[in-house]
Amino acid sequence: MSSAKEYKTITEVKGPLVFVEKTEPVGYGELVTLRLPDGSAKRGQVLDTSDETVVVQVFEGTTGIDRETGVKFLGETLKLPVSEDMLGRIFSGGGKPIDGGPEIVPDEYRDILGAAINPYSRQSPHDPIQTGISTIDANNTLVRGQKLPIFSASGLPHNDIALQIARQAKVRGEGEEFAVVFAAMGITNEEARYFMKDFERTGALKNAVIFLNLADDPAVERIITPRLALTAAEYLAYDLGKHVLVVFTDVTNYCEALRQIGAAREEVPGRRGFPGYMYTDLASLYERAGVIKGKPGSVTQFPILTMPGDDITHPIPDLSGYITEGQIVISRELHRKGIYPPINVLPSLSRLMNAGIGKGKTREDHKQVSDQLYAMYAEGRDLRGLVAIVGKGALSERDIKILEFADLFEERFVRQGRDEDRGFEDSLEIGWELLATLPENVLSRIDRKTMAKWHPKNRGKEEAMVQ
Amino acid sequence: MERQLGQIYRVSGPVVTAVGIKPRMYDIVKVGHEGLMGEVIQIEREKSIIQVYEDTSGIKPGEPVENTGLPLVVELGPGLLKSIYDGIQRPLPVLQDKMGDFIERGVTANGLDREKKWEFTATAKVGDAVSGGMVLGTVQESASVEHKILVPPNAKGTLKALSSGTYTVEETIGTLDDGTELQLMHKWPVRVPRPSKEKLLPDIPLVTGQRILDGLFPLAKGGTAAIPGPFGSGKTVTQQALAKWSDAQVVVYIGCGERGNEMTEVLTEFPELEDPQSGNPLMDRTVLIANTSNMPVAAREASVYTGVTLAEYYRDQGYDVALMADSTSRWAEAMREISSRLEEMPGEEGYPAYLAARLSEFYERAGRVITKSGSEGSVSVIGAVSPPGGDFSEPVTQNTLRIVKVFWALDAKLAQRRHFPAINWLNSYSLYNASLAPWFRENVAEDWNEVRNECMEILQKESELQEIVQLVGSDALPREEQLVLEVARMLREIFLQQNAFHDVDTYAPLSKQYQIMKTILGFSEKAKEAMSAGAPVAKIIAIPARDELAKARFEEDFDTLIGDIQKQMDTQLEGVIKESRTQLGEVTA
């Protein structure tokens, strides 16, 4: 590696990009080291290569690079040394240990781009993960191998929710090995410390691998941080058989970095200046979640992104939503009402929920209860709008009941403590309690059989019959 | 054409520039030492610009490039059904054997199994004059589908030899007088539509078992439909429901730039599910093409053409084929990505200026035709569209709507309310209603179209009334209009909503669809009568038969239940009428 030839033929430095001329043939995506006149070194990657010019993207920023800087092409793509010893360690956003501990003695070097999982080799995700949060477990069930982002916005408690999930997540009745891979992209020092403190407080750190790219670290490094994290996660999952929960925060900062590089390369921008390939790029991260047939582990992703201006149609949440298997949407309105966790179930969705619930997994009535709660809450919220105009007096008796249901739903079902860990049954029982306040003929999502067996008023009867 | 060798000049992501070869547009080239597959998409003087179907990391200028002189082709023959391919017809199970659970590059794989033997029964006779598209014989490809072996479209002559027997796809089954050897398999370039004799008018519906689709916005066999919707509104669930239940004999499902887990779901579910037409596993009639969002973008661009070519091939055998493309927006984005790497002048929102042309070329490959062998076949195309931000004014949705005849508008608001399928009945349309009317009249019920129109009117009326209700509340409406709201609610909750995950409700035969509509309208009529007798709305809607109807659609013995329910409904409303008359009598007395 060190024998590679050094070039001093930089012609242009522009934003994070360096243009180098008159080189021997250089491979696309090759790793590059740059030696600055002051003796410091930086790393980069080839973005475009031809007989005449090579374009290098510098991870650590181009500050201090001049035309005298030496450029070396290493003849291989960026790789991460992986080993079980990564657990409990903290790395920079570029993959260097920053916790004062020793370098990792690698079992292997893995290409950080990661190849696509053959869809034929995938196992359809179907094991529910209990997060202990009712709005997720009952209405938006998370399953192993899923990618389910939190759509939040500035000023909302997404970090608390992410931590609560990382703390409480469990699969029922099995003593399997869990690990958390945490990748911070452009978050502030303060936020990072908050996460670290919680990891230490709960002892979660020993089963976690942490990559930190903070707000004052170079933006370009953010492009590789999540890929390092996923490479570590895949190793832990598919080689060591662990169930890995990957938390990214904040994807919005990642996309900003992507836009920055696109602009420096003078690419034709897509919506709001973001590159046209952002969908494909995000997919190359999100699609690395999954379960592989015949392999014990799994990679589940929990990316956090903040929606600029609370706008769910902004390209970042929008493109994410098209790739991920649902989304958990945090609502400013509920947060203002003082409800924690302020998850609005209406725009939230878990696409893989149906595969993970029902008889033998959670409970046979799960789907119907969930649908009914949704429908009633949606109607209740509409009625709130109506009441604001015409007053409660104009509502029918049925509508008043539904209106009251919506309030109860927020107070009893959505609201829970930061350390309150509800089981699937607990959440469904609260659901039934609330549904029982409504006349039976409005419960159109529940079929006769389920009604007879699970409606609180029928419970006693059935037991009596069995006896 | 002899093979030419050149070398790489530049590599920029999936776009590679080569010098030293003189290819034609869309020729396939092998790039680099590993021979990665690529396609020529632009020629600039001595430079050929190539889109590469695999990852290009580590590829260097100076590496060799070889022109094969052939366009991108697919292999057509028995063995397509039950297969799962990537965008360029490489079978994914074979790729798994060769490279493990992750897709590495530089591996080639034949579309059709070379080892497998098929039992061929010749139907054409030696001495017959044959030409492209005519049937030579048959192979039982799967329990559901008898594969017709066709004369390759460009061949013509007199059959000199042809014999039944057991063959692999490459073995010679016969010859023409000009010496052309015939096999079970032939190849066809994906970007060229396969020829047919004549296009027919679409006057037979593609029955899908989905009430809102068949009942209100039917698609014709050979027709085109678009399902645009924001994320989470149920595009994929709708596409999969169509793939499962539509009465096509062959289904081609293209997962174009979508989620890996979704393809896996189809792969695990389809072999388990039963085709309602034949009773065999659904997989027996299905070809899957999976090019997920993180697989190479150039292969995503090709996947749509690969899919439609396979569909046309089964059409040419005289079958009705349904092609689902999920999602055409990802295909358009693949075009945009390649176009931007080529530094082409962009059109709207960065999409290439030829976006509209490509979309219309694709949808035009749909149609019901008389095939070259004289039978009837069709390709119906259903394209999902994923508009950014759910905004239907964006270029892909708009250019698609200019071509397709059926528009199933998914609505995030309905989805949030768990109204599924979340198809907005006010925004959607089908331009086939008129041409399909005679079929429904003959095959389902004499008054199908009248019943349908009446339901549509009630729903339309409801939306007008809702605006007033928003202002003054429903109690302020006249009684007749309150009743309209109630009937519309029944239509929405009992007819339009359909649970794709419920064993019974997931598929509704046309007769059931008709009965539900008819019963609700029957209720409406009788309720009006009750109302003129002075019965209050609350009484009318409280009759138990109404709830019975709501639950009956989940029951397996719907056909027997429905008669009872109609009777009960009548009796109960009669009761309400009598009661009101008595009370009215008491008051007057």
Image: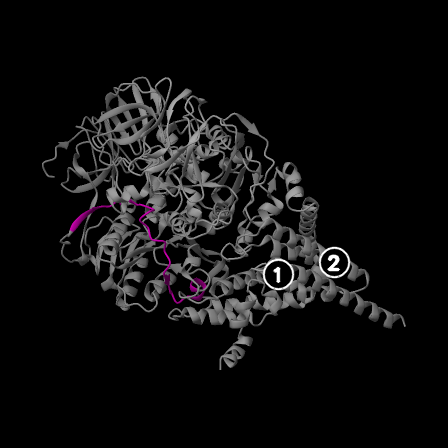
Is B206 included in the stretch rendered in magenta? Answer: no
Q: Which residue is mark 2?
A: B477
Crowding near the residue tagged with mark 1, few <14, some 14–19, many ≥20 C-alpha atoms within 10 Å: some
Residues shaded magenta: A108-137
How far from the left and from the top, in percent, is residue B35? 24, 31
| Residue B570 relative to residue A448: left or right | right
* Residue A54 visible somewhere in the drawing: yes
Q: Chain of mark 1?
A: B
Residue B515 located left or right of residue B314: right
Specify the label residue B33 is tagged with: none
Residue A424's spot in the image, x, y percent? 42, 68
Disc on res. B550: 1
Q: Amino acid at mark 2?
A: Leu
Establish if B212 lies above or below A464: above
Earlier residue among tags 1 and 2:
2
Q: Which residue corresponds to the image point at 77% horizontal and 58% vertical from the top-left? A: B528
